[in-house]
Image (tube, helix red, strand yellow):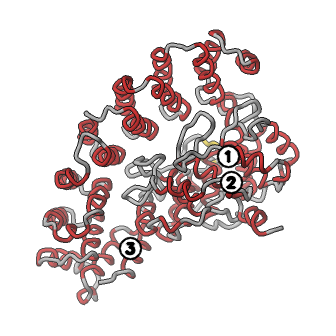
């Protein structure tokens, strides 16, 4: 560190200085001042940026949650330009294979996509990750990112219908999975009327509640659509009444949303205050 | 329920402050100023700030300042960065020594990091992240110099990072993450812009972070971690929805993360402690009004009496 300090203070931008930063960074890759100085040296020496990418990728493998390393990668990518996009995506794909929710890797990947391109295989990549782990919230987020921002797809309106089907399939696969429920809610945000007219919704909810009567997310979603104006069909009415009558008396006079809120207070006691608030806020 | 081992934690923090040559200290050397903020704020919340010599601390902090730019580095001899500049200002505020700096010089440094689109870079190298939006806004507000930036654009940029689930990411389109949410909500709170938030939607997302063990995670399907006791809790308080989590269970979780022998708090039970998690655990308990602790401001992340002194005394 003393040798580094000496060249740093002297502002010596030489091959020796580069080597010293290499040694120092291998010992302490979090030291952001050394990274800054290294960039000055690289610029001054006009160093080989591909070699530099190999160096930083090596460090990133061992320190995948280090902000300085990812920022250095971004600095390099910007210099290397669009031709480097695919190699960069290969690298983040590699990191995400080992840690599929690495926030730094995802941020970096999004930045490279927007700045340098490489969108063509991105939706497939999201799908692959979701096949490996349908609970991966980062992959769900990336999916929405691709659908709404990729210049190669038609945008959300073009893909909306198939996205609803995709999400419903994921929910049925595992109804206790928070991410696709939020994704579904997000899809209908721009389309609130279809939330209460789309037959897929009550169908989905009934399918789940028949097999998983304690699925909090399903009850919550049903509560939401009822509050937004869904007219419950007979099956839904029966499902709610059948489930809620199992518990305390006095529930038989209450409307469906109120019954559901009471049931949720019992099913999800850690959030009992939230469900009590929902009950007090019913506007039907 | 166990109790908060205040004495042990105070001793732990003071011992970390003294250690400069062991492996952990060397590896963390470049962010010592953050460590000072975490350690000293924790001591103050526990009414133990008296164990520290304020003049020594102030002298050391000033030696971390880059004379040319006015910004602060993470330690002596380090390049300036907005993260350490905020920590410096926060610690000086704690010690009631903001008079020790040239306020305009420091705030010019921070304001100079704002970009055309309203976002903030961390330093001259240009990394953009909503963390830096919060850090810059918090810092300038404490120095009464918010007028040096374009607040409207800063708010616009933060709002552009809002996601469909009501949360916020580090950049537009970035996944909602409790840490980033704290930064965005804090920045919006400080600039009087909380009307941009759907409090019910975000409040629900945040209260869904509470898991069966009582602890909080940062994103769906991730592990609980004591630091989220701060990021999630302070966000919930700022949007007035903190009653949506089970505070009792969360308190128990935090207390279970203490090392009752050596002091300090870890990310989850039985793991190694560090100053970062010690601060967030104690701060989280303070937010839940744990007896014997000073109240802490959820937006400025400083004791309320310090914030009152800055804004309400002349």
Answer whether residue B218 is visible to the viewer in this image.
no
Residue that carries the numbered disc 2 in the rendered image:
B148
Q: In this view, does B94 lie above or below A53?
A: below
Tell whether A20 sits left or right of A260. Answer: right
**In the rendering, which numbered label is found on residue A180?**
none
| Camera-side residue of B230 and B257 | B230
Q: In this view, does B267 lie above or below B244?
A: above
Q: Residue furthest front?
A: B116
Which element is circle 2 on? helix
- Characterize the local packing of mark 3: few (<14), some (14-19) or many (20 or more) Cα atoms within 10 angstroms: many
| Camera-side residue of B184 and B247 | B184
Q: Distance between the residues labelled 1 and 3?
A: 43 Å
Percent of width and height locating residue B246: 48, 67
- Mark 2 near mark 1, Cβ–Cβ under 8 Å? yes
- Characterize the local packing of mark 2: few (<14), some (14-19) or many (20 or more) Cα atoms within 10 angstroms: some
Q: Can you tell which of label 1 and label 3 is closer to the viewer? A: 1
Q: Distance between the residues labelled 2 and 1?
A: 9 Å
Tell whether B272 sits left or right of A93. Answer: right
Quadrant of image for the N terminus of chain A = top right
**In the rendering, which numbered label is found on residue A275?**
3
Quadrant of image for the C terminus of chain A = bottom left
Classify residue A248 by image quadrant: bottom left
- Residue in view at x 48 percent, y 17 percent: A49
- Mark 1 near mark 3, Cβ–Cβ under 8 Å? no
- Mark 2 near mark 3, Cβ–Cβ under 8 Å? no
Q: Is residue B201 above or below residue B43?
A: below
- Residue in view at x 65 percent, y 23 percent: A37
**In the rendering, which numbered label is found on residue B110?**
1
Q: Earlier in the sequence, mark 2 or mark 1?
A: 1
- Residue in view at x 22 percent, y 54 percent: A157
């Amino acid at each position: 560190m003393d040798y580094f300090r000496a060249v740093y203070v002297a502002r010596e931008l030489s091959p020796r200085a580069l080597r010293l930063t290499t040694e120092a960074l291998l010992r302490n890759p979090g030291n952001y001042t050394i990274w800054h100085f290294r960039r000055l040296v690289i610029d001054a020496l006009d160093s080989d940026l591909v070699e530099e990418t190999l160096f930083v990728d090596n460090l990133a493998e061992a320190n995948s949650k280090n902000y300085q390393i990812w920022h250095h990668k971004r600095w390099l990518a910007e210099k290397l330009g669009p031709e480097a996009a695919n190699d960069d995506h290969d690298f983040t794909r590699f990191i995400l294979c080992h840690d599929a929710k690495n926030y730094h890797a995802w941020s970096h990947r999004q930045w490279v996509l927007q700045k340098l391109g490489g969108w063509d295989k991105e939706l497939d990549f999201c799908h692959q990750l979701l096949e490996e782990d349908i609970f991966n919230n980062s992959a769900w987020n990336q999916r929405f990112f691709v659908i709404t921002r990729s210049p190669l797809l038609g945008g959300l309106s073009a893909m909306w219908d198939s996205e609803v089907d995709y999400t419903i399939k994921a929910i049925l696969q595992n109804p206790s999975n928070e991410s696709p429920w939020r994704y579904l809610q997000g899809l209908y945000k721009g389309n609130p009327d279809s939330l209460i007219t789309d037959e897929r919704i009550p169908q989905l909810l009934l399918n789940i509640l028949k097999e998983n009567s304690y699925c909090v997310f399903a009850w919550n979603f049903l509560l939401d659509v009822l509050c937004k104006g869904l007219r419950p069909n007979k099956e839904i009415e029966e499902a709610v009444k059948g489930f809620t009558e199992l518990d305390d008396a006095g529930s038989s006079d209450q409307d469906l949303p109120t019954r559901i809120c009471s049931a949720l207070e019992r099913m999800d006691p850690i959030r009992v205050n939230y469900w009590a608030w929902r009950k007090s806020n019913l506007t039907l | 329920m166990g109790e908060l081992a205040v004495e042990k934690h105070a001793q732990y923090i003071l011992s970390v402050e003294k250690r400069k040559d062991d492996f952990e200290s060397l590896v963390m050397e470049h962010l010592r100023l953050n460590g000072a903020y975490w350690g000293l704020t924790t001591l103050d919340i526990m009414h133990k700030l008296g164990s520290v010599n304020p003049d020594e601390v102030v002298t050391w902090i000033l030696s971390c300042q880059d004379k040319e730019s006015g910004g602060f580095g993470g330690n002596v001899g380090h390049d300036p960065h907005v993260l350490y500049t905020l920590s410096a200002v926060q610690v000086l505020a704690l010690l009631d020594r903001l008079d020790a700096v040239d306020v305009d010089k420091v705030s010019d440094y921070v304001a100079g990091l704002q970009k055309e689109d309203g976002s903030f870079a961390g330093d001259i190298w240009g990394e953009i992240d909503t963390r830096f939006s919060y850090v810059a806004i918090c810092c300038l507000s404490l120095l009464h110099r918010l007028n040096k930036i374009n607040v409207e654009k800063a708010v616009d940029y933060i709002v552009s990072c809002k996601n469909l689930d009501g949360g916020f990411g580090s950049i537009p389109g970035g996944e909602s993450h409790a840490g980033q949410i704290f930064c965005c909500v804090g920045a919006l709170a400080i600039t009087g812009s909380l009307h941009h938030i759907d409090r019910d939607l975000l409040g629900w997302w945040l209260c869904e972070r509470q898991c069966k063990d009582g602890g909080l995670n940062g994103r769906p399907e991730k592990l609980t971690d004591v630091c989220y006791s701060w990021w999630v809790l302070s966000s919930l308080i700022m949007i007035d929805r903190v009653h949506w989590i089970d505070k009792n269970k969360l308190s128990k979780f935090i207390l279970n993360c203490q090392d009752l022998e050596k002091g300090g708090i870890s990310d989850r039970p039985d793991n190694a402690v560090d100053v970062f998690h010690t601060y967030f655990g104690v701060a989280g308990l303070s937010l839940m009004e744990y007896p014997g602790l000073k109240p802490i401001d959820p937006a400025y992340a400083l004791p309320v009496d310090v914030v009152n002194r800055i804004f309400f005394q002349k």
